[in-house]
Image (cartoon, rainbow, N blue to C red):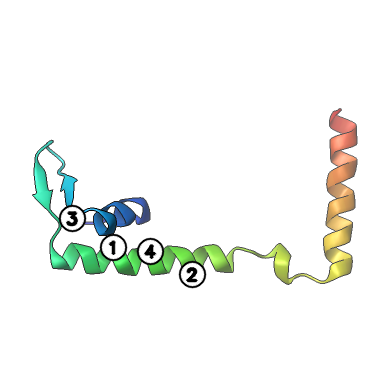
Amino acid sequence: MLVTARQSVALLGIPYYTGVHGGIAMASMKQRSAARRNIKKAAAAAKRKQTLKHLPKSTRRALGKEAAKARRKAA
């Protein structure tokens, strides 16, 4: 059973979850460990995607000016 990051949080936080067919089932150890792995992977991916944070100051400033220019045109 493939578990998404959002479901992973639910599986870890509450010992019971609603199954696919509406019944209540206990999350297995395998599912809980998969949930922990998914959360770690999601956190790492989110961290990697923070590209702007790692750019030089001049580039960040130029991007900000470009965004402001686009907002002025839209208004």
Q: Nearer the viewer, residue 59 or 6?
A: 6
Circle 1: is it few (<14), some (14-19), or many (20+) Cα within 10 Å? Answer: many
* Quadrant of the drawing holding the C terminus: top right
Q: Residue 23: x, y in percent?
A: 9, 39
CA gap, disc 2 to disc 4? 9 Å
The answer to whether mark 4 and mark 1 are in CB contact below 8 A is yes
**Which one is earlier in the sequence, the residue at label 3 or at label 2?**
3
Residue kind at label 2, given as amino acid type:
Ala
Tag of residue 35: 1
Q: Position of residue 65 (x, y in %)?
A: 90, 51
Q: Dot 3 corresponds to which residue?
A: 15
Mark in front: 3 vs 2: 3
Mark 4 crowd level (few <14, some 14–19, many ≥20, 10 Å Cα): some
Identify which residue is drawn at 18% across, 47% down: 17
Image mark for residue 39: 4
Q: Earlier in the sequence, mark 3 or mark 4?
A: 3
Quadrant of the rendering where the N terminus is positioned: bottom left
Residue 44 badge? 2
Q: Tag 2: Cα neighbours inside 10 Å, few (<14), some, or many (≥20)?
A: few
Q: Secondary structure at mark 1?
A: helix
Which label sits in the foreground, 3 or 4? 3
